Amino acid sequence: MYKKNRLLRLALAATLLLGNRPSSAQEAANIDPSSSPLHYVYQRDWTYGYARLPGQEEMRNATAGTPLVSVTYLGQHGDRYDINIEHDYLPPQILHLYCKLPCSVATVEQIVSPVTLKVQTVPVPSTSILGAIVKDAVAGKLVAFGYTAQGKWDSAQNQADRILASMDAARPWTSTPYAITIRNPLAPSFDCEGTRSAAEKLICRQPELAKADHHFTERYFIAQLVAKDQAAFERIVRRRWEERDRICDDAACVSAWFRRQQEYLDAVVHSGDVAEN
């Protein structure tokens, strides 16, 4: 299943590129690449991985693999930088984001091919995961999809070979915090076979709560990308999560908890600030 999803995501990246190929894979926008350190911690072909902290579900289940944000750089088009951030969700999702210099903000399109579900503007704090990704793109550290490391457009056969090799390669990482268990837009973000609290049992039994949980995880991932202090953000989210499981034993309590969490995540996505009001 992963191989099929990977092919769909790469096909979407190719679709976004066709007819709008970047003029160069290594344009540096007047920034000296040697002055900027590499921020990614994993690289294979056109996939780059950026470190993130594990989500609650990953920690609870001791999920194997290094938690990373999986990125495909689509290149520079004039003063605009295009980047795909991949989900492992089913159906396959991509966050297509683009920004123009100085890239202090970015537009994010949530895509389930061929449909764009949502478009929003987010900040790009320098200390965030998204900030690290954009810095590498602007500094010419990332090879654009379809290009060779020497900055030349690769042949169709070589591209196909590299895609197939990437699909067959060992995958020592997970790309989104709740990807292991999300299977459809109405399902909870965790495995209901392993529920441990009254709140989780309610979420598994009631469709409206399951839907709220799914939306929460999608918003959580974007907040994780833009949070100025990832460690502090994760501590707050984890504490709130534990409070829910300790306190909530009815649907009204769980529903109210989701509303408060959504408000907090919306505030993080809007500013990058993680402090609670």
Image: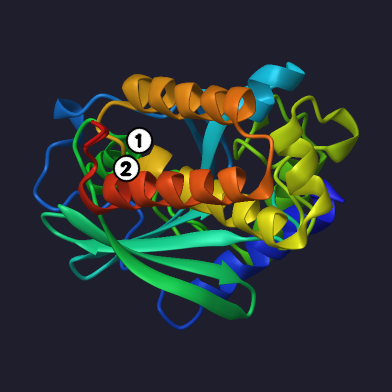
Label 1–label 2 contact, CB within 8 A: yes
Q: Which residue is mark 1?
A: 129
Coloring basis for residues:
rainbow
Along the line of sight, which residue is nearer the eye, 251 or 122?
Answer: 251
Q: Which residue is mark 2?
A: 226
As drawn, which residue projects farthest toward the right? 193
Label number found at residue 107: none
Q: Is residue 18 above or below residue 206?
A: below
Residue 132 picture location, percent across and down:
30, 35
Residue 218 picture location, percent across and down:
54, 52
**What secondary structure is found at the residue carrying circle 1?**
helix
Label located before the other in sequence (1 or 2): 1
- The amino acid marked with disc number 2 is Val
In the image, 31: left or right of 114? left
Residue at 36% x, 28% y is: 233
Residue at 74% x, 27% y is: 197
**Residue 10 sits in which quadrant?**
bottom right
Q: Considering the image in quadrants, where does the C terminus appear?
A: top left
Label 1 and label 2: CA atoms lie apart by 6 Å
Along the line of sight, which residue is nearer the eye, 161 or 83?
Answer: 83
**What secondary structure is found at the residue carrying circle 2?**
helix
Residue 133 picture location, percent across and down:
34, 41
Q: Nearer the viewer, mark 1 or mark 2?
A: 2
Residue at 77% x, 34% y is: 169
In the image, 248: left or right of 98? right
- The amino acid marked with disc number 1 is Ile
